[in-house]
Amino acid sequence: MVTTSEARVEAQFEELTDKKPIGAEVREFMRKQPLGTFGAAIVFVMVFAAIFADIIAPHDPVNNSYEHILQPYSAEYLLGTDQFGRDILSRIIYGARTALFVGFTAATIGAITGLVLGVASAYFGGRFDLIFQRIMDIFMAFPLIIMALAVVAIFGTGIQNVIIAITIPFIPRCARVVRSSALAIREIPYIDAARANGFSNSRIILRHMVPNVMAPFLIMITAFVGQAILLEASLSYLGLGVQEPTPAWGLMLQGGAEEYAESAPWVAIWPGVAVSLAVFGFNLFGDAVRDTLDPKLRSQ
Amino acid sequence: MKFPRKFAVPVAAGLALAFGMADAAKAETPKKGGVLNFVVGSKIPSYDGHIEGTFGMIHPIRPFYSTLIRVNPDNPSSPTDFVCDLCVGEVPKGEDGGTKYVFKIRDDVKFHDGTPLTADDIVATYKKIIFPPEGIASARKAFFKMVESVEKTGPNEVTFKLKFPSGSFIPSVAMPFNFVYAKKDLDEHGYTWHQKNVNGTGAFSFVQHQPGSFVEGKKYDGYHHKGKPHLDGFKAISAPKMALRLQAIRGDRAAIEFRGFPPKARDDLKKALGDKITVQESDWNCILLATPNQRRKPFDDPRVRQALSLALDRWGGSKYLSKIAIVKTPGGVVFPNHPLAATKEELQKLPGFGTDLKANREKAKKLLKEAGVENLKIQFNNRGVDQPYKVVGTWLIDQWKQIGVDAEQQVNPSPVFYDKLRKKFDFDVSIDFNCQSVVNPIADVTKFLGSAGNNYGGYKDEKLEAIYDKLLRAETEEEQRKIMREYETRALTQAHLIPTLWWYKINPHRSYVKGWKIAPSHYLNQHLDQVWIDK
């Protein structure tokens, strides 16, 4: 049985945390962040297409149909066909799967690794922090695409190597941002208290510091997904990413843009639109998440 | 062994018609002057023709050099029409039962540095090509296996002695890579000097090379073919991307690209520029081959290799791929239309060339089942070049899918691709090519021999080697053809290398470029001495 005093404490706690139902949170987000909502809608459509590609794609995306090469828009092929007679709409739908798989995997692995390393660097400080940050400086000195190109040149092409190529440049970027937040956390007395209690370093980092830097982490991860999609498309466009016949937007541009931009423009236009929309969507959504989670921006 | 001469006239006439040479046959008086700008889609690894095999070197560098003999510039589509370049008169006939060839050397030729050309230069050049010192590379040494010696036998006379008569000797001498170097340069600077330096007797002398940008040449006034060259100079502009090359021609920053464009590009240019563009087309002595790696299981099993060949719809592929790629003609081991090539009827009897596609693929599935690899997965090594490698690669994957083979394509930049194919042998099946310059089937088909230096399948087929040995020594034309069929049947039944489609050369160029005639190879007819600008 809950005593009166306990009930009062719980009520006060709920009042302080001001926890709203999820529906209300979403409505408030939509009201305050209309552009972010638009971005989220694009992301939702992409995710839906990726998950249900097998159901909604009208044709097999890798099935060559030589009787139908380079056909313009028609009832059978809504966005036309490419140079192998493959349905462009189906390849774009399946391409969302490739883009999201690469985007989410690279962004998640890169951000989580950066999170742990960034917090550890802040926590240990001293020489470890100094050396680690200089290593991060070296990685960050290279533009994202250059670093990704270098990694692909070393490991070779293919979807796994593309993920590795995109993940590696994300790690220092996330680690640097997270470290700056973690430096402040490290100075808060409860970390000293945890040390005094004899908790292990890994427990302090993972249980007490990491949860307190989640806001910048989430902002980074949403931004990374958009960047990863763009990088995957760029690498595939350069012929260094995923390979034929895998449906991927950058690869579709690479295969069709040069030769058929004039005589069959639909081969180049629709994959380009898909890449642009996806990156636009993730950027809008990421900005809105940042505005919502960042206390300084929220107060403004 | 002799070239089947009885075929020469009908073949030359047939090829000329097939290659659409009618326009080029119009006699026009060349105009003097002007600089020809052309685009090149590949880099120059070095200037040394004796070690290189790429059009990236031939197109910009060939105009600086001469060769002992060459394919007739006015009839380059003929596989039998050769003319003297640095020799005098007619191309010599074989003496002593076809084992001795005596070349009379011109006495009016000077290198660009002023050194007169002598028989010693020819001897030194061919000794470098045929008998290079240890540690010195020579890409075409194997083509001269029949040569016993090359000696100066008079003040202006060079004699080649052969171990046995061979119909492939003269075509081998005519290869455009056999640049004639000055003995003085070889003696004074060594055998690698020409990799970075140019001193030839060609129609143009070297002006400059800006790596990654252009090569520039100017008219050589002392050129031995009097009245030539017609141009004041040329500029070979480096443009690795096809879109760039197309735009260069469209915008008239370049007049021609000598390798070839896909059909769609031709159509776009023609549509945009009308009669300002002239198109020359030809069958191409170049074929892409799928090479199973027989060092790995299950590709050491002929049933698996044959299944991969049976899966291919070559006749359908010819119809469709020729719309999007620079490939067209189904063929066996010999360049189509050549007298030694299989006729359509002969070809259709070979595994994978039959017209009943359904039966072919059923048989392929059965073979895979018998070999215990019904759900075969393969790593397919391909080269990161669109035309025609990636297009044909994507087609192959689709064809193999029809018999349940799951191929994962690994497209690699050229250096990585070659490394995997030629050094590491890190592939299940790899694309490879057999692109030759002068049409010379008896030499060209050596690609299918496991012992050949340019074969990477990792196999020994003694039976095939024995048939080739018979072919080399065949005395009569009929015998050559008969043995070639035997060779082809063995090679394609064993499916050591799996032929796809022969290439098809399409050269749309500015109509003001005159005098250049398309050849069945992108290596041929690139000395440019006969080219002129009609502006």
Image (cartoon, coloured by chain):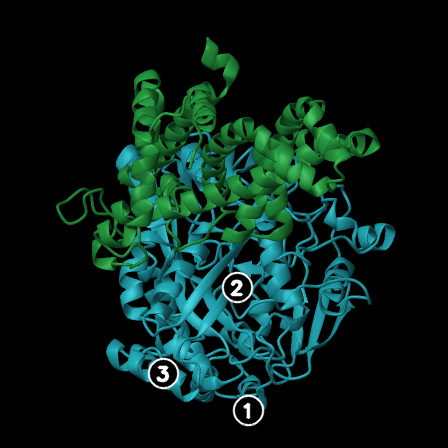
In the rendered image, which residue does mark 3 sit on? Answer: B350
Q: Nearer the viewer, mark 2 or mark 3?
A: 3
Q: Amino acid at mark 1?
A: Lys
Q: Quadrant of the C terminus of chain B?
A: top left
Q: Residue at x 35, y 19 (%)?
A: A33
Does residue A212 appear anywhere in the picture? yes
Q: The residue under label 2 is which amino acid type?
A: Gln
Q: Chain of mark 3?
A: B
Q: What numbered label is drawn on residue B463? A: 1
Rounded to the nearest angstrom, the CA distance separating label 3 from label 1 is 18 Å
Q: Closer to the N terminus: mark 3 or mark 1?
A: 3
Nearest the viewer among B375 and B236 is B375
- Given residues B37 and A139, the one toward you in this image is A139
Which label lies toward us, 2 or 1? 1
Q: Which chain is green?
A: A
Tag 1's secondary structure? helix
Q: Are marks 2 and 1 in contact (CB under 8 Å)?
A: no
Viewer-proximal residue, B446 or B376? B376
Badge 2 and badge 3 both on one subunit: yes
Is residue B492 in view? no
Residue B20, quarter of the rendered image: bottom left
